[in-house]
Amino acid sequence: MDIGLTHFAILSTGEKIAAPDTFRKNESKLAKSRRRLAKNQIGSANRRKVKLKVAKLYAEVAGTRWDFLRKLSTRLINANQVITVESLAVSNMQKNSMLP
């Protein structure tokens, strides 16, 4: 398995696993809720409601990411006998213009 820049992971079989795009799907809802939160008066009941809505959206994004990682790791563990780990500096890989 190799962590990719355009895909979440590329397996040794050549299968490309796309990253979950949950934040992008909820980005407009989050932006709208954050704007409403910023305009509400501090300490008001409506602010508490909007703050809870923003927190639920962030929890949904985090939960979806966690679920994706959990399912992927379980799938990889069940399908393979040996898994090795290598630490790479992905930020340095992004700076390299020679990589695809």
Image (tube, rainbow, N blue to C red):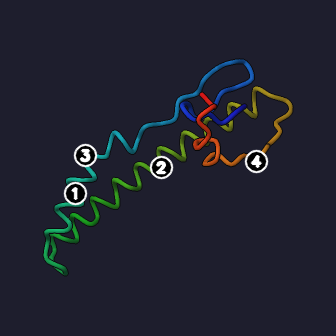
The image quadrant that residue 33 belongs to is bottom left
Quadrant the C terminus occupies: top right
Point out the frontmost of discs 4 and 3.
4
Mark 4 touching mark 2, by CB under 8 A? no
Which residue is the site of mark 2? Answer: 63
Q: Between disc 4 and disc 1, whose residue precedes?
A: 1
Quadrant, the N terminus = top right
Would you identify the image quadrant in which residue 3 lies? top right
Q: Amino acid at mark 4?
A: Ser
Name the mark nearer the viewer: 3 or 2: 3
Disc 4 and disc 3 in contact, CB within 8 angstroms? no
**Looking at the image, is mark 4 or mark 2 earlier in the sequence?**
2
With 50 as the anchor, is 58 left or right in this view?
right
Depth order, front residue of 52/65: 65
Mark nearer the N terminus (4 vs 3): 3
SS at mark 2 in the image: helix
Say which amino acid is labelled 1: Ser
Q: Residues within 10 Å of mark 2 (few under 14, many from 20)?
A: few
Secondary structure, mark 1, is: helix
Which residue is more in the foreground, 86 or 48? 86
- Residue linked to disc 4: 87
User: Circles 3 and 1: CB distance less than 8 Å?
Assistant: no
* Location of mark 3 (residue): 28
N-terminal of the pair, mark 3 or mark 2, is 3
**Mark 3: amino acid:** Ser
Q: Residue furthest right?
A: 82
CA gap between label 3 and label 2 equals: 18 Å
Q: Which is nearer the N-term, disc 1 or disc 2?
A: 1
Q: Residue furthest front?
A: 97
Q: Is there a contact, CB below 8 Å, between mark 1 and mark 2?
A: no
